[in-house]
Structures are given as structure tokens and as C-alpha cells.
Amino acid sequence: MIDLRLLRDDPDVVRASQRARGESESAVDELIAADEGRRAAVQRFESLRAEQKQLGKLMPRATGAEKETLLGRTKELSADVKAAEAAVGDAEAALRAAQLRIPNVVEEGAPAGGEDDYVVLREVGTKPEIEAPRDHLELGELLGAIDVERGAKVSGSRFYYLTGVGALLQLGLLQMAIAQAVEYGLTPSIVPALVKPEAMEGTGFLGAHASEVYRLEADDLYLVGTSEVPLAAYHSNEILDLGEPARYAGWSSCFRREAGSYGRDVRGIIRVHQFDKVEMFSYCRPEQAHDEHLRLLAWEEEMLAKVEIPYRVIDTAAGDLGSSAARKYDCEAWVPSQGRYREVTSTSNCTTFQARRLNVRYRDEAGRPQIAATLNGTLATTRWIVPILENHQRPDGSVAVPKALQPYLGGRDVLEPVKRA
RNA sequence: GGAGACUUCGCCUAGUCUGGUCUAUGGCGCCGCACUGCUAAUGCGGUUGGGGUUUAUCGCCCCUCCCGGGUUCGAAUCCCGGAGUCUCCGCCA
């Protein structure tokens, strides 16, 4: 939810943001009207309620004719108050609906436009020269690391088994991510993968992304698509001490329906229904959020350096931001078999947008509660296995293990095929 | 799955049977002031959060006794539904 005070004081900032995203400016005027409507309704209710309370105080002492008159008036009031209260409820619901229609105000400097209007900030590393590169699935099968056939047999398409060095590789990656997080003072966390509707809604995943989310009807729970959800809801309805940002690194499985992605990335484990991820999450004061965002990005790049894969960093265009994000940077790893970069991390600055809905606050210098800012960023996911296998492959189908990962793979520096190439 | 108890303004707690000076009691903690060489002790005052009004302050007003309904002129208090916590029983790993 955006800040209504900003909306009242500076609606043009919100309009400009809508324009940059390619979204409706009239939604801004609708929200302004809804805000005014609510305040008018509140005032009507409160003045009636105040009179009701005043008269109510006279009641115990009143007698005879006086009491009769009083009762007549208060009965009238009782109905009016009830009606006015209902009107406030309606006005609040209308306001909330209008508020939910407007995504976060885009940070200044973010490129305007849609999916293809991103700006490449930098390219890092050297792309390997590989003649006729094998793709990650072929390599994964050679190594006995990835089994999508049996994944499909047991669970359907877009499911897979990681076996042998594949399982070790994922565990190693995620452990390395946790180790790095701990090194920088983040609190390592293992979080629920099932959450209540409030948590899902509060993080903004039941809006445009609703069809992406698995829902367990019988228990009214949702499977999370990222540990951002349980980490953001972790401090909901709390007032935090945010002298220093509160930082977490959450490990969880993630579940995505991938509705509407038929035919895209059907091969291998690039786009799957279930994967594992270590996600950073930070709560901080709004004025710290910009710097914190760059810090998260730096930590992501440090992880990419450790696995020694070439990547580029893009500044996502306004129209391609999630509804909660004010700015988003993605790191995209080089995938030799595809000859292009694919997203492996994503870090978003959600400013106060997400925390307002989840009611996460801190105390400012004056001791007054204020809405916190939230940020998130990826440290490692199952998908990382793709560029790792492909960039480090050798002609014989073996795969070199990046130095930093070797301790997590029993010290081995190369993964050897278990079947004939 | 079954039965019961509980949920009050940071924490603990009074109030709920018997609806109206509850504008919620007291203690602890915290903040300010006074007193005192310092500390401690003591005294006085303040201390839930949200919203409306206001340029802002001051002030005034409304909401908030787990949540949502209902009864009533009036609900912390009565009724219904729900959530959470705890205890016991059963079942399962």
C-alpha cells in the first residue's frame, strides 16, 4: 500500500510513477476520492457518536419526563450511529480496494517502460569458449545429478529429482549461501513453506500473481513461492528496534504453479514447480533502504563470484517491477547452451509498501512508531545449478567444481560422468 | 478428533457473576521533574496504539479490554461465531 500522506501532499509523484510503469493514472484520482470519502464518513460517524456518548452520561441520573425525552433522542441516535458506522466500513473497504490497485511508487532513476526496457549496469566475468556446449540437463544426466524423467513420472512435468552430486551440489550451494549470510551478520532462518492468507496477501502475492500460487483448499493455507513471504510476515504487527537493519537469510522450498508459462523452458530445471532457495530479507528505516538495496546486490554478486560464473546486472524497468517493488536489480548468469543470460538473483527495494500492509514499524528518535522499509534478495537457488554445470563443463562431459564449492562436495574438484558420454 | 481453562493499555494484574462516574485498578519497568556531594531511597507527574480536526503546536473528538457479529438508549461486562495459548484424553509419526 502506498502512503496516503504522500498521495495527498504530492499526487503528481504517484501519477508519474504510474506513467513510468505504464499503468493507469486515473486510479490515482480514484484513490484520492476514496480517501476523501472515508474521511467525510469518519467525521459524520464521530460527531454522532460523540453526541450519543454525551447523552448516555445523562441517562443514569435522568427521571420521569426528562428521561422519556432523552430516550427518544438516544433511540434515534442509536440508529443513526449504526448507519454512519456502516458507512465508514464501506468507505474504508472502498479505500482499501483503491489503495490495493496502486503499485509502489517507483524509485527515482529506475528506467521507464516494460520488460525489454531494462538497463544493463555491468557485465562481469569472461564467457567460456565452449564448442557445442551440452546443456545442463544433458550434463546433469551424465553426472547422475538430475532426473527429470522420474520427476515427471512421480509428480508430473516441471518436477525433478536431484540425485548424487546433484543433491550435494544444491546442498553445497545453499550452505555456502547461509555461511556467507552468517559471515555478514544475517540471522540464518528455516521458515514455514505454508502460510496463512494474510501473509500471502500482505506480501502482495495474491494480486497479479494469484494464479501463480498453490493453495491448499482444505486448510486455507498457501505454499510459498519464496521465503520472502514468511520472512516479511515474521515481524508483522510488531514494532522493531531498527538502530541497525534487521537482516535474515531464509532457507525454504519454493512452490510455483507456473500457470501461463506453457512451452517456456520446458527442458531441465530452469523453470520448475518446486525448488530451494536462500533468500535475504532486510527490515530497515526508509532512509537507509537505498543503501541497503545496493548492499544486498553486492552480497548477491559476491555469491556469483564464488561460483565463478559470468553474469550481468540489470536495472529492471518500471513496468516489469513487482507491485511491491520500487526498484529491482537482477543478476543474470551466462547460460552457454542458450547463448544468453538468465536470471539467477533478484533484489527488490519495497520501501514502506509491503511493511505498511503487514504493519511492521520501528520507533523514530522521537519515540513515535513509523512504517519500516523492507528489501529482499536472492543468495542461491536450485536454478544456479544450470549455469554452474554449463559454464564449468569440459568436452568429456565432466564438470569442474568452483574452488569455493569444493569443501561442500567432499573436497572434489571435478564431477565425473557416471555413464558413458 | 474429544473435553476444559484462559486472552484487559510494554510485562504482571483488578474489574466480568449483578451493563451506566471503567474517562479501566494496582504493581513492575521506562521517561521527566524535585530533593540529595554521587548513587540508592523518597516524592510528584507522565507512559497502548490507530484515526479525525489543525499550516504546525496546544487542544478537542472518535476508535481500541484477542477478532467478528448480535442484544441494548448504553457493552471490558450479556448472547452467538471465530482465532490463539495452555491442560487433559484419544490417535499417529
Image (spheres, rainbow, N blue to C red):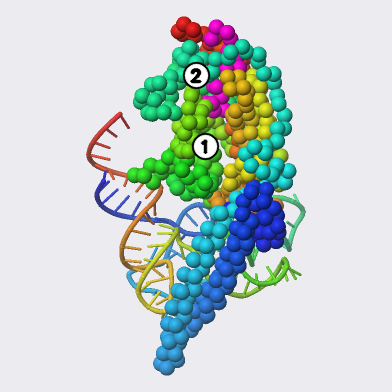
Disc 1 to disc 2, C-alpha distance:
26 Å
Read off the chain for label 2. Answer: A
SS type, badge 1: loop
Using residue B34 as the reference point, say whether residue A90 is left or right of it: left
Q: Is residue A218 visible?
A: yes
- Of tags 1 and 2, the one toward the viewer is 2
Looking at the picture, tell me which residue is in the foreground, B76 or A91: A91
Read off the chain for label 1. Answer: A
The answer to whether tags 1 and 2 share a subunit is yes
Asked if marks 1 and 2 touch (Cβ < 8 Å), the reply is no
Looking at the rendering, the stretch of residues picked out in magenta corresponds to A379-397
- Label disc, if present, on residue A137 of the rendered structure: 2
In magenta stretch: residue A395? yes
Q: Which residue is found at the position 66% from the left and 25% from the top? A: A311
SS type, badge 2: helix
- Label disc, if present, on residue A227 of the rendered structure: 1
Amino acid type of the residue that numbered disc 1 sits on in the rendered structure: Ser
User: Residue B86's spot in the image, x, y percent?
Assistant: 37, 45
User: Residue B64's spot in the image, x, y percent?
Assistant: 49, 64
In magenta stretch: residue A7? no
User: Residue A401's spot in the image, x, y percent?
Assistant: 58, 13
Q: Is residue A304 visible?
A: no
Amino acid type of the residue that numbered disc 2 sits on in the rendered structure: Leu
Q: Which residue is found at the position 55% from the left and 75% from the top? A: A44
